[in-house]
């Protein structure tokens, strides 16, 4: 059997140098982007030696690429130091990406995946002037009848969505005042399970410890819900991702399959918004 000729042999004498040049340009672009991404992952400021070690290249090679990035405005050298920092062009790109990264758009794929995987009603909510407000709503093929739609405002204490905002924004005076008013106006059957003393603080602590909020028959009779926080690039809670369904039809506990799925999708949405999750213990 006759051996096939090398790929280069099928090219003309003029095409071989062009092909090699294209590969070199691609490799150079990849290395340049690696250096730029490495600087970003190091907080936007690093010395040459630290950056070279981070990207796994020699300092001399990284220096050559930094020189090009400085010339194009993507990197600059901090005055009076040997550190390189992200430049105006890199900042402009970041701002453009941030303008496109908003919770509703970023959450759409996650809502679809949760609806298909769990066959539950799913929605994303943001904090509005009157409280947590649903801004995107997805129903399963066999929807359940709930008094919640886009634009619905949910309570802070009695909905899983509200508890997410209350837990991760617990230092905001406005939310605390709203929660205290809800508690004062709630019937005894709702107040009772929260106990005496700082019931709001204990509730927030429990949600933080679980990484999500769960409710059963509190906001809507016969309905359970699980909600997890979505973080923006500044590590602030900007939205809540929630699933709900008939009580007893799914496991609404904090360690159940639904809660695990919601937390995972909330982390995925957060990543799309530029949130860098802290490394888990023991990760290396």
Image: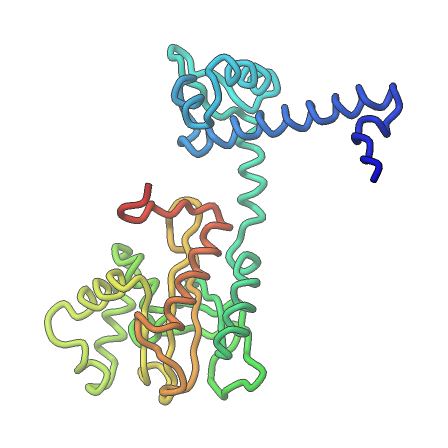
46 is higher (above) or lower (below) than 236? above
Residue 29 image position (x, y, % from top left): 63, 27
Can residue 175 be seen here?
no
Residue 202 image position (x, y, % from top left): 18, 66
- For the N terminus, which image quadrant? top right
At horizontal 84% and vertical 36% (from top left) the residue drawn is 2
Seen as rendered, the residue at the extreme left is: 197
Between residue 61 and residue 141, name the one nearer to us.
61
In-image side of 41 versus 254 (left or right): right
Residue 197 image position (x, y, % from top left): 10, 70
Seen as rendered, the residue at the extreme top is: 80
Between residue 161 and residue 10, name the one nearer to us.
10
Seen as rendered, the residue at the extreme front is: 1
**According to the image, what is the colour scheme of the structure?**
rainbow
Between residue 133 and residue 98, name the one nearer to us.
98
Residue 231 image position (x, y, % from top left): 41, 53
Quarter holding residue 234: top left
75 is higher (above) or lower (below) than 231? above
Quarter holding residue 163: bottom left
At horizontal 56% and vertical 86% (from top left) the residue drawn is 142
At horizontal 51% and vertical 79% (from top left) the residue drawn is 119
Quarter holding residue 158: bottom left
In-image side of 30 versus 48 (left or right): right
- For the C terminus, which image quadrant? top left
157 is higher (above) or lower (below) than 230? below
* Total marks in image: 0
Can residue 28 be seen here?
yes
132 is higher (above) or lower (below) than 225? above
Between residue 273 and residue 281, name the one nearer to us.
281
């Amino acid at each position: 059997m006759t051996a096939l000729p090398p790929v280069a042999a099928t090219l003309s004498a003029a095409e071989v140098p062009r092909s090699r040049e294209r590969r070199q340009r691609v490799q150079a672009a990849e290395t340049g982007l690696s250096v730029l991404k490495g600087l970003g992952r190091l907080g936007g400021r690093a010395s040459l030696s630290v950056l070279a070690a981070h990207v796994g290249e020699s300092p001399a090679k990284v220096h050559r690429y930094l020189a090009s990035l400085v010339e194009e405005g993507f990197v600059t050298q901090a005055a009076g130091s040997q550190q390189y920092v992200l430049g105006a062009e890199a900042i402009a790109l970041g701002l453009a990406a941030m303008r496109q990264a908003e919770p509703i758009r970023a959450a759409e794929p996650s809502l679809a995946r949760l609806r298909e995987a769990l066959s539950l009603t799913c929605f994303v909510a943001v904090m509005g002037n009157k409280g947590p407000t649903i801004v995107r709503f997805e129903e399963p093929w066999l929807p359940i009848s709930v008094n919640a739609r886009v634009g619905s405002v949910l309570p802070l204490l009695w909905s899983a969505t509200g508890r997410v905002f209350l837990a991760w924004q617990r230092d905001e005076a406005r939310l605390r005042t709203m929660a205290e008013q809800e508690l004062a106006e709630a019937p005894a059957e709702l107040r009772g399970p929260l106990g005496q003393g700082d019931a709001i603080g204990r509730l927030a602590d429990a949600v933080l410890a679980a990484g999500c909020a769960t409710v059963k028959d509190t906001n809507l009779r016969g309905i359970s819900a699980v909600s997890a926080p979505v973080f923006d690039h500044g590590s602030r809670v900007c939205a809540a991702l929630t699933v709900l369904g008939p009580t007893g039809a799914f496991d609404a506990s904090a360690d159940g399959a639904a809660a695990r799925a919601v937390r995972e999708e909330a982390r995925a949405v957060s990543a799309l918004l530029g949130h860098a999750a802290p490394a888990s213990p023991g990760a290396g």
